[in-house]
Image (cartoon, grey):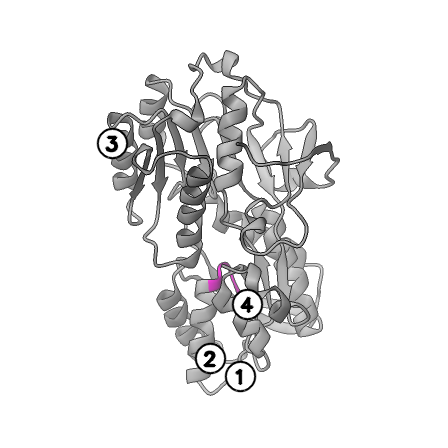
Amino acid sequence: MSLPIRRTLLLVTGLALALTACTSRETQQSAPSGAGPAASAAPSQAATGPGCAREKTGYPQVDVKNAVIGFSQSEKEANPFRIAETQSIKDEAAKLGIPADKLLVTNAQSDLNKQVSDIKSLLDRGAQLLIVAPLNSDGLQPALDAAKAKKVPVITVDRKVTSQPCADYLTFIGSNFVEQGKRAAQEMVKATGGTGKVAILLGASGNNVTTDRTKGFKDEIAATAGIQIVAEQTGEFDRSKGQAVMEQLIQSNPEITAVYAENDEMGIGAVTALKAAGKTPGKDVKIVSIDGTRNAVQLIADGSYNAVIESNPRFGPLAFSTLQDFAAGKEIPPTVVISDDQYDSANAAQKLGNAY
């Protein structure tokens, strides 16, 4: 049973900032109202064409509920985002009645070569459909080529690859990362009152998430003359590295009054470093990050954090409904953009149950 979603036509202004050069019709899907964590598994999303139909690719028709499906996770599941992402895939498979032994799950442990090997292994084990959370935007072409040779459709989630949709993979499902960065900048302006010296904790290099979240933030913050970016350094999306970088920045740039962390884990690491330095995060140093993890949202409610832009990891429902649409012969757009929520001091306590 595919996720019950009402489709209506939607015009989305400015979406092209975050998308590749796809311009055409856009549709929106809405989740049920009154959503807690389970219902938020189906966030509203916009799809961009032109579409890719099964007849165009020559791929065989596959009954999703009876197929062997492979899921390639990119990073070790110490990060709440990855835990929730994998669980969403498993939960939706179970909801559809797919036997546990027909959902094959691998984890590349943040090793690109291992992810290529993992995907080839899934194909060797009989996977007829693939869902891939890429580690990097580049480097997966050998694995995509192997899937194409066996006529196995691939959906990518969370991070875009530089390969060609419809030709090398079917579609990408994920957030508008430029828009996330823009919204984080807007929240930073609110938190600082439009004046401050900001440090950016960059995500890992080599993927579009880091590039786009940085671009969106910088482009938007440039419109506020009173805010100056005084430092930027990668924390690689890791809590301990985010803490270590923040410790260094406190020493080299004691004038920092705000931190933009490109994921919650680095932001939480920054909180630890700031407290150890005798500062009061959320007050002395404003903190805005992206993800929507329970720990970060709780820090907002406790007053030690200022805002979080959500990046929803619950791709399971959209991934499986997209595979079912493809099997039914429908056109699949090259990019499906999920709209994300956000948290601040006004709603964090009430929305904590939606965090992951």
Whole-percent x, y for residue 49 in the image: 62, 26
Residue topped by disc 1: 280
Q: Which residue is drawn at 25% across and 28% down?
A: 125
Residue 121, numbered label: 3
Residue type for callout 3: Ser
N-terminal-most mark, 2 or 4:
2
Residue beneath label 4, please? 297
CA neighbours of label 3 inside 10 A, class few (<14), some (14 to 19), many (20+)? some
Looking at the image, tell me whether mark 4 or mark 3 is earlier in sequence order.
3
Q: Amino acid type of disc 2?
A: Leu
In this rendering, position of residue 293 left or right of residue 247: right
Would you say 74 lies left or right of 324 here?
Answer: left
Front-most of residues 278 and 194: 278
The secondary structure type at the circle numbered 3 is helix
Which amino acid does the dot numbered 4 rest on? Answer: Val
The percent position of residue 283, horizontal first and vertical second, equals 59, 81
Q: Which amino acid does label 1 sit on?
A: Thr
Label 1 near label 4: C-beta < 8 Å? no
Please give left or right for residue 169 compared with residue 76 in the image: right
Q: Do the residues labelled 1 and 2 touch (CB within 8 Å)?
A: yes
Label 2 residue SS: helix
Q: Could you tell me if residue 252 is visible in this image?
A: no
